[in-house]
Image (cartoon, coloured by chain):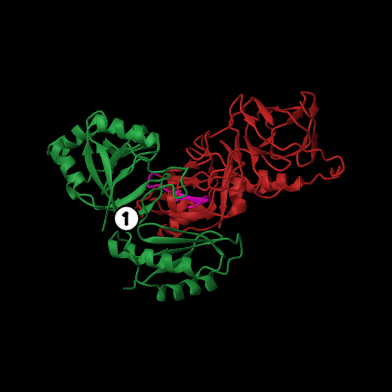
Chain colours: A red, B green
Amino acid sequence: MVSVLKAGFYTSVQDLGRHGYQDQGVPVSGVMDSYSAKLANALLNNKETDAVLELTMTGPKLQFHCNTIIAITGANLSPVLNDNKPLKLNAVIVIKKNDVLSFNSPEYGFRSYLAVKEGFQTESVFGSRSMYNIMTSTIKVNIGDRLEIKENTFHNEIRKSALVKTNTTHFSSSSLDVLEGPEYDLLSEDLKHIIKKKKFVIGKENNRMAYQLYDEQLKNNIKPIITSIVLPGTVQLTPAGQLIILMRDCQTTGGYPRILQLKEKAISQMAQKYNGDRILFNL
Amino acid sequence: MSYLLNYKPYGECAILIEWPSRINESIFIDIMAFKSEIESQSNGNIKTVVSAYNSLLIIYRISENLDYNKEIELLKSCYSKKQVLDFKQRRIWQIPVCYELSFGIDLEFLSQIKKISTDEIIKRHCKPNYLIYFKGFLPGFMYLGGLDPVLFQARKSKPRLKIEKGAVAIGAEQTGIYPIESPGGWTIIGNSPINFFDINKEKPCFAKNGDYLQFYSINKKQHQDIKTLVAAGVYELKYKEI
């Protein structure tokens, strides 16, 4: 069991999402940066689908009440063990009963992933532990929560050398690989040119549902579409010139033209961006 | 009847099929028939099929390198083989709604704009059988067709930050029910005490696409009583078979 001494800015339990219920209006949810989360589980020899903690900008303070091993990937939020030992990212870390894990200042990236051996054992609803409004009893981890994990003593299994190097461009590159969305052809040649060439600045309005970017040059008269299906990674364009990049907790349907679709890897990269960062759509 | 359909790749692992840009029942029935054929032919490589007014999205299990041309050919042949849908099991669900002003917070506003009485609005809202085209937006939200054109009302330019669970509302040419508390820009005319999405049930929403909803007016006391029964898990929603 893990007790939550401080919650951090936005900490939630996530796995690879709740699939197959979009026709009931249920968002997919799941880890924002699946690339980093999968790496955390892989380091521990977990299943890809095991639930991890997604930490946002500032991490929580957690106390472990059993022995286990953990791995931290994604953004570098300066993890520290027992207030004095800085921890490496992308490595297997041995945790003893009563150890306290905390985080200092964010160094790079926006979302970090904490995996524990065999995954967090919080409630599973429709095949997923991903926290989401009305599916799970809470939408995020709160101070005082107790998160179930499994006791593990793995003296022999720890590979001291198990430290992987990640590609730093995952965090630093502003270029996002995209495909044409279903309504791409409704864009004028001018708009297509702007969308392919311009570096857009990320605004303050972003969360697990969407990133919203505004650009004066993107004002347009394109008519809304008859409500249709949208996916995480879909980029919608509003008449006012707003680009809405849908993320994992997005609604299942929408009426704005779907002009681009981020590739899976680009959704993960996007999840590491924050206010003031620039992005470029690579079509 | 067959339509000229448009097949498009959508992202790395999905294909979007589009019907003409119209909302009507014959397109809906064609979509349902095609969906049912795809699901019966699926060899396990399809993760899920999602429908909307004039589109169908096929999401594949594969995460990259989907052979679009091959899959689109398979889908086209599937469309040519689709069967006439057996619609024997369709139901008209009787949905209780309290239209009193404490719930119908925009009723008087709507009455002034439309220059008809609130009673007339309620009468017109309760008359049709509304077809459930599909679900989306929020868990358990149903996209309904059949609203009386007299009641069409544009979305508010400034959405409310909080709309109560169960709010019955009008947005442009549609009427619908907010299944959970949510922000929203629709005109609120009443509230239904029933649950439109229950995570404890295998089928979280009682109604399926192709069923109908019909609203009937209840008073505040009945609203409270039904809410109590729903919370206790013993309320039985009434329906008519078509």
Q: Nearer the viewer, residue A210 or B227?
A: B227
Residue at the extreme front of the image, as rendered: B234
The chain letter for the residue carrying disc 1 is: B
The quarter of the rendered structure image containing the C terminus of chain B is bottom left
Q: Residue at x 57, y 65 (%)?
A: B45
Q: Give left or right: position of A81 versus B207.
A: right
Q: Residue at x 82, y 45 (%)?
A: A162
Note whether B39 is above or below A28 in the view shown.
below
Residue A198 appears at what percent x and percent y?
A: 53, 49
Q: Nearer the viewer, residue A273 or A254?
A: A254
Q: Is residue A235 magenta?
A: yes
Callout 1 secondary element: loop
Q: Is residue B210 visible?
A: yes
Where on the picture, by quarter, is residue B87? bottom left
Residue A76 appears at what percent x and percent y?
A: 70, 36
Q: Residue at x 39, y 61 (%)?
A: B55
Range of magenta residues: A231-240
Q: Residue at x 53, y 40 (%)?
A: A208
Q: Is residue A2 magenta?
A: no
The quarter of the rendered structure image containing the N terminus of chain B is bottom left
Q: Nearer the viewer, residue B201 or A95?
A: B201
Helix, strand or loop: magenta stretch: loop
Residue A48 appears at what percent x and percent y?
A: 68, 50
Note whether B216 is above or below A95 in the view shown.
below
Give the residue number, with chain letter if any, for mark 1: B211
